[in-house]
Amino acid sequence: MKRVIPDSGLTPVAAGSKCEANAVAKSGQKGLDAKYQPRISDHELQQISRDLNSVVTPLFEKTLTISDADYKLGRLVIPKKCAQEYFPLISGPEGVTIRILDTRGREWVFHYRYWSNANSQMYVLDGLKDFVISMQWQAGDVGGANIPHISAVTFYRIEPKGQLVLGLRKASVTPPSHKVWHTKLTLSPSVCVKQISVLHE
């Protein structure tokens, strides 16, 4: 069965034109879980549109898990509802080859499939090892001090072609707190007790 891509209501416009800001639309899919709503600014979206010379629509966002960021596994689990809404229809667990652009326009070839899990299906993109290494993916809840890292991926669609685009979003990094320590010595006839207290953070 051929999947019919819903009309987004957008009119393709040349990237960089005066109409670009209005043509680049944010996803407004009803029923999409709040945690999958794309978090992207108008400026970022317009930049992607310019880089791809296309009108793009954000579809959904997913925070990377530990397994998503494991280059040895080289796979990305796609939320079921998002997979069924935006990815090609697949009739069997063997899946299909799928071509996805990154936000700079480079094409990547992945394998899209599902496997049965407790009377349901889990959808995954396989073959991401080179992509994960190239983009230096890290899970959303892991990061080194003072080093921004990739915490989430956002999927977009080029209008009106329907081409999928995969983008990355870096987590905000909170600098480590700076603590000033004060050492106080309390003397007694039998023992010297060192007391340490935090003045401020």
Image (cartoon, grey):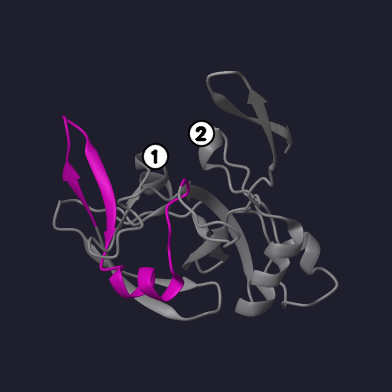
From the image, tell me which residue sits under label 1: 81
Residue 7 appears in view: no
Which residue: 47% across, 55% down?
5
From the image, tell me which residue sits under label 2: 33
> Which range of residues does the magenta coloring cover?
113-141
Q: Please state if 128 lies on the left or on the right of 21 as rendered.
A: left
**In front of the other: 41 or 129:** 129
Q: Is residue 135 magenta?
A: yes
**Which amino acid is tagged 2?**
Asp
Residue 109 appears in view: yes
Q: Secondary structure at mark 2?
A: loop
Give percent across and percent down for residue 34: 56, 34
Q: Secondary structure at mark 1?
A: helix
Q: Earlier in the sequence, mark 2 or mark 1?
A: 2
- Do tag 2 and tag 1 residues touch (Cβ < 8 Å)? yes
Q: Please state if 114 lies on the left or on the right of 42 as rendered.
A: left
Where on the picture, by quarter, is residue 41? Answer: bottom right
Where on the picture, by quarter, is residue 187? Answer: top right
Q: Residue furthest top?
A: 189
